[in-house]
Image (cartoon, rainbow, N blue to C red):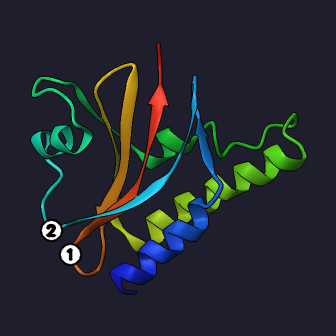
């Protein structure tokens, strides 16, 4: 699959999807090229200070709550959980070794990135607010 095909699938999967934290944010797709996402690169992408913390997490950890299906989730909430499950699966199946990068604190840019078959880094970004 080409980069553009993967990006289009990610656009479709995230259309109308909001990541919930203390504030809700949409997803955006990105293509970084072949540059490894180092801490310096991630801080620059996020517009954060040179000493801002950078945290790496797994997809399972990042999507755990959003994609869960507890008994109390019904209707729209259950539909949304399944959209998050589909997004995670899409990322895992099309990107090599995808990871979640969180940059900064409080209002945190989040990048879910992995290497496409082309060698380029692709993924989706959002924000989480944690006070």
Q: Position of residue 65 (x, y in %)?
A: 63, 36
Viewer-nearest residue: 69 or 129: 129
Q: Is residue 41 above or below residue 95?
A: above
Side (left or right) of 40 relative to 80: left
- Give me the residue at 72% from left, 56% from top: 82
Nearest the viewer among 1 and 45 is 45
- Name the mark on residue 34: 2
- Quadrant of the frame with the N terminus: bottom left
The residue lying at 50 percent from left, 45 percent from top is 60
Label 2 packing within 10 angstroms: few (<14), some (14-19), many (20+): few
Task: Please report contact status of discs 2 and 1: CB closer than 8 Å, yes or no.
Answer: yes
Q: Is residue 89 above or below residue 130?
A: below
Determine whether 55 is above or below 4 in the image: above
Q: Nearer the viewer, residue 47 or 128?
A: 47
Task: Indicate which disc, 2 or 1, sits on the residue closer to the N terminus.
Answer: 2
3D distance between C-alphas at marks 2 and 1: 6 Å
Quadrant assignment, res 116: bottom left
Mark 1: which secondary structure? loop
Which residue in the structure is indicated by mark 1? 119
Residue 115, given in percent of the width and then of the height, sits at: 27, 67
- Crowding at dot 1, Cα within 10 Å, few <14 / some 14-19 / many 20+, comes out as some
* Image side of residue 10 versus residue 96, left or right: right
Horizontal and vertical percent for residue 74? 89, 43
Point 33% across, 21% down: residue: 105
Name the residue: 80% across, 44% down.
Answer: 77
Which residue is farthest top?
A: 131
**Above or below: residue 12 compared with residue 15:** below
Q: How many marks?
A: 2
């Amino acid at each position: 699959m080409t980069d553009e095909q993967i990006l289009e699938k990610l656009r479709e999967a995230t259309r109308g999807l909001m990541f919930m934290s203390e504030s809700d944010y949409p997803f955006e797709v990105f293509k970084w090229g072949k540059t490894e996402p180092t801490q310096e690169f991630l801080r620059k992408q996020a517009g954060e200070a040179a000493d801002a913390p950078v945290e790496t997490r797994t997809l399972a950890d990042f999507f755990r709550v959003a994609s869960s299906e507890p008994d109390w989730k019904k209707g729209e909430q259950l539909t949304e959980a399944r959209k998050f499950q589909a997004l995670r699966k899409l990322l895992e199946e099309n990107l090599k070794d995808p990871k979640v990068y969180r940059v900064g604190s409080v209002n945190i840019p989040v990048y879910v990135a992995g290497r496409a078959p082309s060698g380029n880094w692709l993924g989706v970004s959002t924000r989480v607010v944690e006070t």
